[in-house]
Image (cartoon, grey):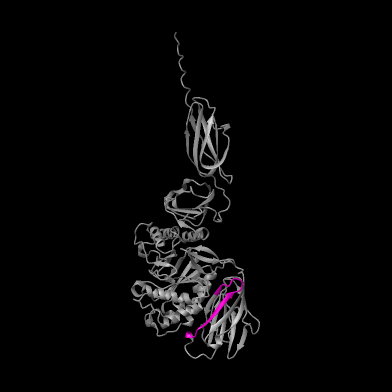
Amino acid sequence: MLATFVKSSFRIVVASQIAVLIAVPLNVQAQNPVASAPGSLDQSGTQWAPFIEWSVVNANYVGNPFDLVASVTFVHAQTGVSHTTEMFFAGDSTWKFRFTGTKTGLWTFTSSSEDADLDSLKGTVAIEPNPNPEIDGFLVAQGSKFARQTGPEGELKAEIPKVYMNLGMHEIDGVPFPMSLMSQPQVRREYIQETIDNGHNALFIHMNNQWFSWDAVSYYDHDREDPELASFEVLESLIVEAHAAGLQTIIWAWGDEERRWTPIGVGGINGVPDQRLQRYIAARLGPLPGWSLGYGFDLWEWTTEEQMQAWAAYLHEHMGWPHLLWARERSNTEIDVVSNDLRPNGEPQDQFYQMAISSFDSSNNRPVMFGRRFAFMRDSIFTMDKTRRSMWQFAMAGGAGSWWGFFANSPFPYPNPEQLVAHEQFWQTHFRLDFQADTLITDGAALRVPENTHYVFYKEDTDSIRMNLTAMTGMQEAYAVDTRLGYQEIHLGTFLPDSLTWIAPYPSDWAVAVGNFGSSAGPDLRTPVISMIEVQALTDKSAVIVWRTDEASDSQVEYGLDTTYGQQTALDGSLVTSHSQELTGLAANTTYHYRVLSKDAAGNLALSADQSFTTTALPPPVAPVELRA
């Protein structure tokens, strides 16, 4: 049931929303309400989701209800961490405020407003751990990395945003993502599932003037200056549903001025209606995890750096929870993410890697987002191979975000979506906040951590990768992934701190991870690969056998006069990749058969094929020297 607190001429309705969020008129019960004691605003909930909502019915206010300011400050009793958010008008003389618990434990809250009916409201919120360990918090910037808050302590987990769109499904008569379409739950469910099935971790929605009016993209399509409540109901439903599925929602606020997809015709950029909208976004959507906001496209045509700085600063000032903001081709200090409009224009395939490296170098330690929408086959460039390789190059440069999917006229679907799913699976377990690109330790691309305990190498169209691991801390496990296939880890055994060249089983686009990433590859059942067997220092009575393995292994040689061998050297248990064993006590001018043996740390034994050599003949006898007096 609903808990109702009576004060003067208004009442407060407390409710907790879980999935689909709808502004609830008076006398209509909210979905999944959480009861509290009569006369109390106290609530309880779980960390990160669902958010908690209070409704205040105040029939006495006269004026534009969207301009009434009331703030609520939540304080965590144990740590003093606080979140301040504003109330938002929800129709029918009702204002609401929301809260997401970022820490477990008891929170207190107090409201403040010049309107007496919204002032000095007090209560508590008890937040328990979320029973679903897969539910994450807010997407934030950690240096140059994107990161999600996770777990009870909000530990940061590195993320590489890959934004998916399908305008073939979500554009009608040139209108992208009309609210009349996106209001359908089945459409949203299919969009979320399609995003996951194509290996992306974020989906795209474009609002334009639908902020102000249902299905309006151009400011010529309406004459409103207040936020459209129904549009916000649809948008927040998508955000919550996507977040529950593990996805981010990436919003474009506006488009370009050529199409009039801007706020210029509604009081101007950062004008009164625009800032009214910005406050509303901060109040209504700010407490919800799972979304980030870009300003639009072709911004060089119709915005200035100063306008974008003021926009971002105003939103940051009014949002009580962190949300990443960016504006393509803008880089002022209020922008959280440096977003660009760079594109390859059909040039060499490694160009994106170099572009991303340069973008990180100039980002002032902020994350990088490639904001150009690299739709499938756009400009006849983004084939399946180019799409997959570009994603890997963005990751290997340091984790740049990027934009993919389909325009309304793009070929559909991706012919090999399993390749994109494999990319997401790999980086969900292997990307780290402390990864740094290192172009000097390989003949491909490489990431490593400063402590030299974790590495990822990547190279295209190759059957080998050179890896300089001389600085590596101790022996480390290694895994390979063929990025052209569905996800499968190939266990490579243990690598030593050394310079080595890994020989792939066949040419492809290969990634190799070195270190303990908590991989799910299972037990090491792979035998070492033996190569470069040679006989050195051959004499009439001895020989030295050398060989290499692709992982650290022990050393032994079996030898004899035929393929039954019968003799063997003493086992050298040192785990190395360069091996040497000396055979002594041999007969001169005799053919010997031998094979080399190497066993890795997991006990997998490799034996070479039969080899042979012939010892040298005895040296001729030395003639006696005749001595004469």
Where residue 82 sits in the image (x, y, percent)? 55, 74
Where residue 416 sits in the image (x, y, percent)? 45, 60
Where residue 298 sits in the image (x, y, percent)? 36, 71
How many marks the image carries: the answer is: 0
For the point 53% across and 44% down, which residue is it? Answer: 552
Instruction: Please state which of residues 97 and 224 is positioned toward the viewer in this rendering.
Output: 97
For the point 51% across and 47% down, which residue is it? Answer: 497
Q: Up-down: is 509 above or below 89?
A: above
Instruction: Please state which of residues 148 and 182 is positioned toward the viewer in this rendering.
Output: 148
Q: Up-down: is 329 above or below 221?
A: above
Q: Is residue 96 magenta?
A: no
Residue 355 in which image quadrant = bottom left
Where residue 491 sits in the image (x, y, percent)? 53, 50
Residue 378 in which image quadrant = bottom left
Magenta span? 66-82
The answer to whether residue 33 is seen in the rendering is no
Furthest residue toward right: 37
Q: Up-down: is 576 above or below 265?
A: above
In what quadrant of the picture does the C terminus appear? top left
Q: Up-down: is 538 above or below 58?
A: above
In what quadrant of the picture does the N terminus appear? bottom right
For the point 34% across and 60% down, which residue is it? Answer: 346
The answer to whether residue 522 is seen in the rendering is yes
